[in-house]
Image (cartoon, grey):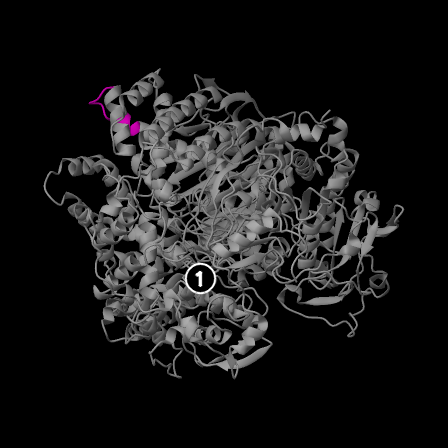
Amino acid sequence: MPPDGRLSATQIAVLEKWIRDGARVPAASTADRMRRTQGMFVVTQQDRQWWSFQPVGRSGLPTVTRSDRVRTAVDAFVLNNLESRGMTFSREADRRVLMRRVTFDLLGLPPTVEEVQAFVDDARPEAYERLVDRLLASPQYGVRWGRHWLDTVRYADTNGGGFDYVYPNAWRYRDYVVDAFNEDRPYDRFLIEQLAGDLLPMDVQPERYGERLAATGLLTLAPKGLGMQDKQQMILDVVDDQVDVLGRTLMGLTLSCARCHDHKFDPIGTTDYYALAGIFRSTEMLIDFDKNPSYWPERALELPSVTAARKTNRDRLAANAKAVADEKAKADATILAGARQRLPEYLMAAVGIRASTEHAAAVAHWTFDRHDDHVVKATSGPDGALANADDVNGPKPIPAGGRLGGALRFAGRREVVAVDPGKLAFLDFGKGADFSVSLWLRSAPDYSPTTADTVLAVTYPAAMWFIAMRPDGYNGIYLRHYDGKRAVDIRPAVDRLPLLADQGWHHVVFTSDRDGMGRVYLDGQQAGEVSIATISPAAQFNKATRFSVGAETNQFRGDLDDVAVWSRLLSASEVQTLFARAVDPARNQNVAQVEQDWIARRRSSVAQRDKFSYRQAAEQGLVPSIVRRFVEQLALASGDPEAPLYALTDKPPQTIAQVETVLTENKDVLQKLLDDTSAGPFVLGSDANQFYGSVVRQRLAKLARDTELIEQTRVEDPTLAMVAYDGKQPGDLRVHVAGDRRNLGVVAPRGFPQVLRGGSDRTIDGEQSGRLELAYWLTDSEHPLTARVFVNRLWQWHFGEGLVRTSDNFGRLGERPSHPDLLDWLAQRLMENGWSIKDLHRQLVGASTYRQTSSPPSDRALPTPDSRDSGNRLLSRMNRRRLEGEALRDAILVVSGQLDAGIGGTVNTWKPKMFSVDDANVEMANYDTRRRSIYLPIVRGAAVHEMLQLFDFGDPNSITTRRGVSTVAPQALFLMNNRWVHQQAAQFAERLEADTEHDAVGRIRHAYRLALARDPTDRELQRAVNFIDPPDAKQWELFCQMLLCLNEFAYLE
Amino acid sequence: MIDRRRWLRSTGCGVGSLALSALLHWDAVGAEESTGNPLAPKRPHFPARARNVIFLYMHGGASHIDSFDYRPELERRHGDPLPESVNTARNQFNANLGTILKSPWKFRQYGQSGAWVSDLFPHVGGVVDDLCFIKSMHSNNNAHTPATLELHTGTQTLMRPSVGAWVTYGLGSENENLPGFVTICPPLTYSGQRNFGAAFLPAAYQGTMIGTNRISAKQARFRNIENRSVTTVEQRRMLDLLRAGNREQLQRSGSDAEWEARIASFELAFRMQSHAPEVLDISGESQQTLSLYGIDDTVTENYGRELLLARRCVERGVRFVHVAHTGGRGGRWDQHSGLVKGHGDNARSCDKPIAGLIRDLKQRGLLDETLVIWSTEFGRTPEVQNKTGRGHHAQGFTFWLAGGGVQAGSTYGSTDAFGYHAVEHPVDLHDLHATVLYLLGLDHTRLTYRYSGRDFRLTDVAGHVLREIIA
């Protein structure tokens, strides 16, 4: 019905735009039905006329007037087009601009000062071509172009999909991609391997079989709704992701639109969609369907024969290990039976050893009562001082009033004091490795740690332990053992924590028993215990390299007093005594004062007998590890009338007869302890083998030799990667009407979209998923889209815009190519040149088109070429491009001299089934790396790395075929205020400072060369000289930061 | 005379904006082209009832039947098994359930409207006449992460823009020196940042974090807003040198709109440094206001501060403020056991601040145009779990809305006698999202973004506006 009256100007404008855009009308629903025959979508002859469905054309090179500007075929097409509009190329960019442009373009890194100079000075012909060859041969090329590819296949290191498990092995696929680019893997091969590497014959290049499996990571990397309760739906969503990658990334078609209805604009029906979906549905990309969460398949990157050999080897090793264990178990049983017979002797030995070590004084003790010139004197123990050694950064804590006399105050300024490294012998706890630490602590008002804040730390060559305060999960104090691999924390039970937050003084004691429990006491009472046996045997507490109080890395705030360290376990009663005597107003005793009584008592008790040691026990045929366990029981029993061995500590026996009397009198309580084969004393340690008989030893020696022999045929551990493989029952899918899996329509036999089937008669073998056929079909030289889409994307990454700007949509909603003949020429070139990608790079970056200046014509009075081509679609100059977040970060690291240019691998130490963010809100991604940005973990379910996110990294939950370029204030704030940027600017400044040959002017010049590949102008130089005044580190740093913020630094001209 | 709010919005906002030029992610001819400033205020589809949103999210699954959904049948049948007539569905998140557990809290009626509120929320009870309860919420996933994603983005598994990003995309921001969408001390678990992310929308629409729940609200700051190594004067000198260098390059290499925009972005960033911290500075708030939010009490201080910041943001024109409540230290609303202590502690720390927020907004005349939403990812089972707790329950739970054009003192929908299924007027999250957009003057079917070859909506192909709850 015609409207009443005139249309408004806005309405007319809308209609005009609609007509300009092609006056498209979505297919009406009746038309949809008419396009079907027996449920199958029908493609018309008109549909096939669409330009991108036509075979790739073959045309000769157009002629041009300025043939002197034609370097590669690209130029003929572009220049011809320009000349037909009365335009021509701009001048060639100067060499420094070109050098920076092409180096960033091919490597994603800036050129070095020397490289720039060498290129500028190279007067020989073809200097530029040689430069391009060198760049293409650099392994950094694969990093740069691999990253482009990863965008288009939504690479990530975590799952997303509402269930953000980390991918410990996704990087194997990343390495595959980087290697493939570096090797110039033919593009058709590259696609076949990623879509169906597992289906290629195993025996063709068997050494590359693993690599081909890793390539199928493409399919498995999809975000997966692992936690969905509808598992069928979960699979179909993953299948849809695959169709989308196949469509938009590889074919430039929005195939996914046809999941719910026939495509509204392109001749793709739901039957076409489900024909493809059936192929992916017949592929396993998920496992554990009966579980929530489900998982994804991972496999070893090796031939089945290797797997079998490993299994054989492991079975033999296991059988051997069992024989050893059986032998030892028998021998151990004999030893234990013997030991039980000698119970009184064991007890006598334990009593003797305990008497020898009981109440041994602290190996070091600081009261913090005396402060001489910031040297904090130790009261006992190491000769000296807790003072700032030269290698310790950061201010010292200041003296303050303490619990007992003076204390050390930490004000959150990263204060730290450390013992002279030459005087650390007191921390060598030796093989025994038991120790205790006592201290008084008062946290500052308002203090709540934001990270783990170290209070005290000891470092050994292969182990460490430290005491720290920490937020969240167990807000409070803990002692962590770390042996280089594992960590165990001794920490108070949760309900005891509030105690520490009241800003009063609290007494904290940790005891660490090498073979048993770690305990923590708060204000004299045990507040928690944890088994540390798993970690302590690995930790060697010898040759301490550092003892420090406070830390330069974090910000503890509070006071510390009366710190003492023992090389033995304090008993519960000793801890109580230390606390009670300190808080007793009449006494107010510190550790040293309490110990004076102990020392007196010990002298009297030890005097009654000779000292006794583990060595003596062993000489008497007593197993030291059993003796140790009795000693521990005695320590626990001290002062505890409920403990089984209390009688032996209350009145220590002097003779075996006395022991026997105690045993008889306490038979009932003791028997339970002695019968306990896990926590009781009759448990053997690793020293048992010294007590084996000679026959047993010979048998064990033989078995050990066998082990060595089997070890020689050991097969290396498998390299796991995320892979896809064919399902057990490949099959066709029915059309899901409106995308609803409960509303099924006709069967769509697995196959390829009708409009693209052309003359091809490829069919899918019912036994397999059809992925291999799909891959061959896709890379057939008859396929009109595959090569076109890829060369267009290559063009886009070199020029900023594709010849078809909608690089993921060659359908009717996409844009038409600006240079259709050029697009086809390049596609032909790719296919005819063995699908070589590096050859195409040479065609593009070698062209005069690419080598033009990016500056617009300066004379604005005349009609400029730009006015005829405002978007520079015709390429009468080069486009300016901003560096992506990765290139910007890498460039900053290069300029600051901090980049680690290593290739391959991962920076994460992830285990399966970890979430990207743990329960305590801690992100698992390790961003603390100086490696190239491709190696930064990409997290789907939480934030992407801050810098990548700010600078337009795409959403890794879906493919990104073209990055956005936004300019927002948070980017500027990042460059102005972020600590990482400050650090890099400081490193940059230090690098300049290290150059002692030059004066300030020389250094400024060097800085410009490093950052911008050019010398400063006179004005720039003058401004910089004025700025760096006074010429101190801060001004140099700010000057360097300024260079990193410049537009010129972030853009390629 | 200009009112305080308008004044707050206009201070310092001369030229410039948070985002100066966003060359938007387009993939089709005719897709939206760059409008320069993505955060410039935009006209709604129709007259709006609300201008701003404060979205309260109880992290972990706050129990409906222990807070606002009074089900006396649970008291009567305490200790009995749930009757077979209730059609139940079981999975690992609500497994090992026992018999019916009555609420440990007493329910009372409050206000003119006589709404039932348990003793968990006595202060919220005091403002029920400003609230509109929706007691028939339901969703179909009872695992935390998917349910939380669905609450915030409308989908359980796919990463989509959050409701805050959609709103900011639809309406822009009213203060050019602040982000349009902020989230105060959010948790990073349950897909964390994706719950306030922009996904495929331009990054300018994503939620800007002020702190995280790992730190106290007192310590919360905008990222990269402070420079700890140099003074403002020194930084200004550096920026002047930068500008001179950039200008010289423009002269040398020829004009460029992007380069001009980038030069301006540094100037705006410099100004933001002085404006953004002002939002977080509550030293000018009266003692009365501080105690209204419970900031003078250690139990309520933290969430009180967060909500006071929320009001200050809204006052200055921030479009969408997201404030999760993650419970006391380490706790969430996820009591599979220890319901009395867990829910008790959580409610004690947020009840007074929430009521304070409603009262404060009202007395300042802001409640009319600010929509407050109290939400959680799901409720909890009527049956006991692990002797002292409740499982996850998605079939029926409660939200409430306040201000922003909703009917004050009303209740919509209900669950069955056991609080199990939403039976009367069931409302799913698409419906809620559609309604929120409607109140802001946006038609959820018309607020679209072209991506990946098609137009996307917050509500996908679903969602009904709940016209019955609109005043």
Magenta stretch holds residue A995: yes
Q: Amino acid at mark 1?
A: Ala
Residue B185: x %, y % from top left: 60, 41
Instruction: Tell me which chain the residue with mark 1 is part of.
Output: A
Above or below, comparing residue B347 to residue A727 in the picture: above
Give the residues drawn in magenta, as a range.
A990-999
Above or below, comparing residue A733 to residue B203 in the picture: below
Q: Residue at x 56, y 64 (%)?
A: A227
Residue A461: x %, y % from top left: 34, 42
Of residues B34 and A320, which is closer to you in this image? B34
Above or below, comparing residue A797 to residue A216 in the picture: above
- Identify the residue under disc 1: A339
Residue B281 visible in the displayed image: yes
Q: Viewed as shown, does residue A939 lie left or right of A798?
A: right
Give the quadrant of the C terminus of chain A: top left
Q: Viewed as shown, does residue B165 lie left or right of A41?
A: right
Q: Viewed as shown, does residue A57 lie left or right of A765?
A: left
Give the quadrant of the N terminus of chain A: bottom right
Residue A295 visible in the displayed image: no
Give the SS element for disc 1: helix
Identify the residue at the far left of this view: A124
Q: Residue at x 88, y 45 (%)?
A: B111
